[in-house]
Image (tube, rainbow, N blue to C red):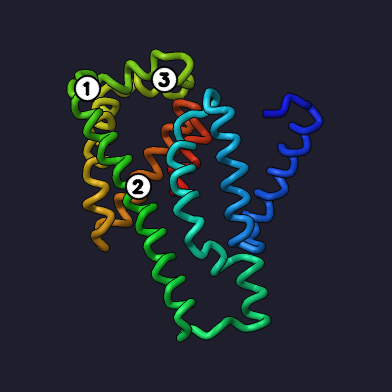
């Protein structure tokens, strides 16, 4: 632990630089590790300012350390296309593909676990059972924006319907996402769901993380 303000400024801005390199896909393996370390340190030290989405993000960022995050739309992919890639028949390449696929699979499983158990906990809640949960959420000023309060009070029937739909879609998500026909619809439904949370409840960081996942 270091209480120096200069040390904090250095580490904080270095973390921003590392994140930028990670986002543009330069030296993916190296900056995946560095970004994870910087984010994990921020997560541990500043957990009291989080809104929940970082819990899922920190788990999946660990899985993504083993994935090839820069295969497309990145500086690494451009450099590989210019200089040529290694043999796709090599043992190392085949192992890296297997590890990458497992990393992506673990991210999907983690997301399914979050949705399924979230839906089950909602199902056990009395306010979710009687369809009034969204109304009570709109009454909590710290987690409600005027647009949510207005919609809930004006469209009671729709509010009850959305309350039940949020439970159904979450519980169905793990089963629907593995079905090629249903996957686009359940993914779109969850994107709209989290967009609604971001606009109505003001949990923008949480909503963006969930939409990206």
Sooner in the amino-acid sequence: mark 3 or mark 1: 1
Helix, strand or loop at label 1? It is loop
| Image quadrant where residue 171 sits | top left
Q: Look at the picture and state if 57 lies above or below 150.
A: below
Residue where numbered disc 1 is placed: 125
Q: Position of residue 142 (x, y in %)?
A: 48, 16
Q: Nearer the viewer, residue 69 or 213?
A: 69
Sooner in the amino-acid sequence: mark 1 or mark 2: 2
Q: At 39% across and 18% down in the image, what residue appears? A: 138
Q: Nearer the viewer, residue 191 or 152?
A: 191
Q: Are marks 1 and 2 in contact (CB under 8 Å)?
A: no
Give the crowd class for mark 2: few <14, some 14-19, many >=20 residues within 10 Å.
some
Residue where numbered disc 2 is placed: 110
Q: Position of residue 87 (x, y in %)?
A: 52, 85
Helix, strand or loop at label 2? It is helix
Q: Position of residue 166 (x, y in %)?
A: 28, 35
Q: At 24% across and 29% down in the image, what residue appears? A: 121
Residue where numbered disc 3 is placed: 150
Q: At 41% across and 19% down in the image, what residue appears? A: 149
Sooner in the amino-acid sequence: mark 3 or mark 2: 2
Query: Spatial distance from mark 3 to mark 1, Cα to Cα?
Result: 24 Å
Helix, strand or loop at label 3? It is helix
Q: Nearer the viewer, residue 153 or 180?
A: 180
């Amino acid at each position: 632990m270091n209480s120096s303000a200069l040390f904090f400024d250095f580490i904080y801005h270095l973390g921003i630089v590392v994140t930028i390199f990670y986002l543009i896909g330069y030296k993916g393996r190296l900056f995946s590790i560095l970004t994870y370390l910087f984010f994990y340190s921020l997560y541990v030290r500043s957990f009291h300012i989080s809104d929940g989405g970082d819990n899922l993000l920190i788990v999946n960022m660990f899985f993504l350390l083993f994935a090839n995050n820069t295969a497309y739309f990145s500086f690494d992919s451009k450099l590989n296309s210019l200089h040529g890639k290694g043999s796709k028949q090599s043992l190392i390449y085949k192992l890296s593909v297997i590890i990458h696929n497992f990393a992506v699979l673990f991210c999907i499983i983690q997301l399914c676990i979050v949705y399924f158990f979230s839906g089950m906990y909602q199902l056990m809640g009395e306010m979710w059972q009687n369809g009034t949960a969204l109304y009570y959420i709109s009454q909590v000023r710290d987690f409600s924006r005027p647009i949510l309060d207005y919609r809930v009070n004006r469209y009671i029937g729709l509010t009850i319907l959305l309350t039940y739909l949020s439970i159904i879609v979450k519980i169905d998500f793990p089963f629907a996402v593995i079905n090629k026909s249903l996957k686009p619809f359940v993914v779109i439904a969850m994107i709209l769901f989290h967009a609604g949370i971001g606009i109505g409840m003001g949990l923008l960081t949480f909503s963006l993380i969930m939409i990206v996942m």
